[in-house]
Amino acid sequence: MNIAIVGTGYVGLVSGTCFAEMGNKVTCVDVDRAKIDKLLNGEMPIYEPGLEDLVKRNVAYDRLHFTTDITKILGDVEVVFSAVGTPPDEDGSADLKYVLAVAREFGQNINKYTILVTKSTVPVGTAKKVKAVIQEELDKRGVNIPFDVASNPEFLKEGAAIKDFMSPDRVVVGVESKQAEEVMTKLYHPFLIQNFRVIFMDIPSAEMTKYAANAMLATRISFMNDIANLCERMGANVDNVRKGIGADVRIGQKFLYAGCGYGGSCFPKDVKALIHTGIDNGYHMEVIEAVERVNENQKTIVYNKLLTLMGDVKGKTIAVLGLAFKPETDDMREAPALVVIGKLLEAGASVRVFDPIAMPECKRRIGNVVTYCENMYDVADGADALALMTEWRQFRMPTWNVIRKCMKGNVIVDGRNIYNRQELEGLGFVYTRIGEKSL
């Protein structure tokens, strides 16, 4: 099939590349000339394991193309995926200007039956607005060209996006016609030959499914962080509690890990947008509003623990291990590390940081107000305390004797609960984690 992907961010580039890998002819479109030039030169605008090799292979086989001009290709494609950004406005609602701009160009340029599929995360009711804009442009042209709109929200996990796309646990598609359903079935069939797991539904339900899924996962995280904070006060251990409740098949083990809060491009934005959607429709999402409050408070917990153990951090040197909001990505959107670094600098501390991937992104965001280090031992050099913010695999088994010698102080705050208390305290560290009362 001949398809176009508008937007070469995380969702668009991964989706387009994976569709090309299945033999489709794919053109990725973006208004950012610099980003397209980089892609044409084989440079990736994002970090995702395995993506660079996949892009280069499909470019070499002439299945994957990049352009800034959507008008040149709309006459030839069968399906257009809209994967542009929907950044939150100040009130938390999703900004749809880019989504509607794609719809406008679609209506201005199609010349045969084509489907516009929204892959961006958008509020319920967006498809109606998209359809109205397309029809408005067709009316201006004085033409009667058939088209369909559809909703196909993405459920990709950063760091495992290619696997998720190539072998999805489900594909949600909202359609309004049998023809659109047949086209989308043809497109996804190669991914799900053995077990066709495409769930077709009405478009509003598909739009809501994406928000509901992310809100549920965010709720589990905030719930466990709330429980963890109570565990500390009661002398319980949140890891034991997690194992106990996770053994219940109705609950399960996933997304029950306590930590220093969620971040990234999806959960914070989607939770805010769902809250705002409720308000717009005269309904307060009481649980989801609490989820957001808990998470915002949780992002400060590592800083608060540093204050508890050290008192005043003014003039102290704090090592921050991990910057990205999760491992296997350079994404720092809404990252808890940014909150902790900001509070430390505001309190007069010096901050040393290390992340295996995200340091260029950190420098782009906050500049040289921190010291960027070469590795996990360099970051500890002369530090009064060390705070773990991202649980990268390479951070799991450091040589603690070396770190103890490098550090000036001995405080370790484990924001992701990956270290062994007995081991660290046996080496003379003052160690604290989330959801366990310090001994």
Image (spheres, helix red, strand yellow):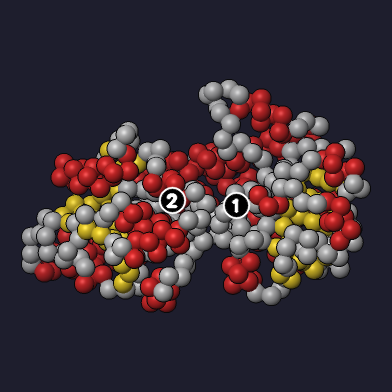
User: Camera-side residue: 125 or 218?
Assistant: 218
Amino acid carrying label 2: it is: Ile
| Residue 98 position (above or below residue 196) | below
- Residue indicated by mark 2: 162
Q: Earlier in the sequence, mark 1 or mark 2?
A: 2
Task: Estimate the x, y position of residue 190 in percent, counting from the top left.
Answer: 28, 44
Q: CA distance from mark 1 to mark 2?
A: 17 Å
Tell me which corner region of the image, top left, top right, bottom left or bottom right, holds residue 6: bottom left
**In the figure, is residue 286 to the left or right of 82?**
right
User: Camera-side residue: 57 or 303?
Assistant: 57
* The N terminus - image quarter: bottom left
Q: Tell me what residue is drawn at x 43 percent, y 51 percent.
A: 162
Q: Secondary structure at mark 2?
A: helix
| Residue 126 position (above or below residue 173) | below
Tell me which corner region of the image, top left, top right, bottom left or bottom right, holds residue 337: bottom right
Task: Estimate the x, y position of residue 309 in percent, counting from the top left.
Answer: 86, 51
Q: Decide if residue 61 is in sight here.
A: yes
* The C terminus - image quarter: top right
User: Camera-side residue: 122 or 49?
Assistant: 49
Q: Tell me what residue is drawn at x 12 percent, y 64 percent.
A: 111
Sort mark 1 into few (<14), some (14-19) or many (20+) by Cα contacts within 10 Å.
many
Task: Estimate the x, y position of residue 122 in percent, counting from the top left.
Answer: 37, 53
- Residue indicated by mark 1: 326
Q: Are marks 1 and 2 in contact (CB under 8 Å)?
A: no
Q: Secondary structure at mark 1?
A: loop
User: Camera-side residue: 439 or 372?
Assistant: 372
Amino acid carrying label 1: it is: Lys
**In the figure, is residue 81 to the left or right of 418?**
left
Q: Tell me what residue is drawn at x 19 percent, y 56 percent.
A: 78
Q: Decide if residue 282 is in sight here.
A: no
